[in-house]
Image: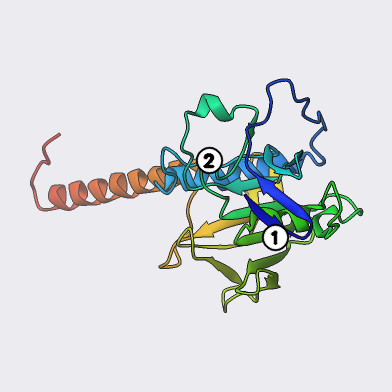
Amino acid sequence: MTVTQDYQITWEKLPDDYKLPDDPVDNINQPALAAALTQSLELAGKLPPNALTPTNYGICATLNGKIVVKAPDWAYIPKIGVNREAVIRSYTPQLQGDIPVIVMEFISDTQETEYSIKATYPPGKWFFYERILKVPNYIIFEPDSGSVEMYRLESTEQYILQEPDENQRYWIAEMNLYLGVWQGTRENRAGNWLRWWDEQGNLLLWGGELAEQERQRAEQERQRAERLAAQLRAAGIEPEV
């Protein structure tokens, strides 16, 4: 148990009969943005089997005996310590595994709930991520404009706005990856996407990009073979089929 503000924080499993809010996704782009982040991690071999990348999914804590559930648009939890069947409805850090190392909110309305530092029950999202969960990295992304705000939990235990590097990317130390904005099209959505780059600056590719890369490689190999065959014939040698 820990204490922050006037809260005693405990980590308890969500009761089976607890009714989770059945809110619709705020924006049609949110699932696509979240799925793209997870897919590139998985294809690059950077998603361990016991990691969790929940999307619009309840992360819980109990404050003074009252349950609080917040559902970030995307999060990365390095390791869960229970079977996945145990976290189908919700996830309780400390009890069921690690604290998320990053949470993201994709802005889609004007209420700015992502910035809520409301400390009284039920607390706002910012307060919950910063003071209750103590998530090291908090990303607020506005897909239409492509603006990104990255806040990092400093030694003061408060979020401090970070500046991007010379490539306009942000280093996520816990994941050993950079995060930045990329413009392009995926699944018929043209616009701004959050994407990952490795330490060497290589973009982590999506499935369609990997397939296209392989297609181009095969085409280059076919052309090389045709050129070699032509050279052999010009020399009076019939190439083996």
State the image coordinates of residue 197 (x, y, percent, origin top left): 49, 61
* Residue 92 can be seen in this image: yes
Distance from label 1 to label 2 (Cα)? 20 Å
- Residue drawn at x 62%, y 61% as measured from the top left: 137
- Please state if 205 lies on the left or on the right of 88 as rendered: left
Marks 1/2 in contact by CB < 8 Å: the verdict is: no
Looking at the picture, tell me which residue is in the foreground, 123 or 43.
123
N-term mark: 1 or 2: 2
State the image coordinates of residue 42 (x, y, percent, origin top left): 46, 43
- Give the residue type at disc 2: Leu
Residue behind mark 2: 52
- Residue drawn at x 10%, y 41% as measured from the top left: 238
In which quadrant of the rendered view does residue 13 lie? top right
State the image coordinates of residue 104 (x, y, percent, origin top left): 68, 53
Element type at marker 2? loop
- Please state if 157 lies on the left or on the right of 109 as rendered: left
Say if 209 sits above or below 156 in the image: above
Q: Residue furthest right?
A: 110
- Please state if 184 lies on the left or on the right of 81 as rendered: right
Residue behind mark 1: 130
In which quadrant of the rendered view does residue 55 lie? top right
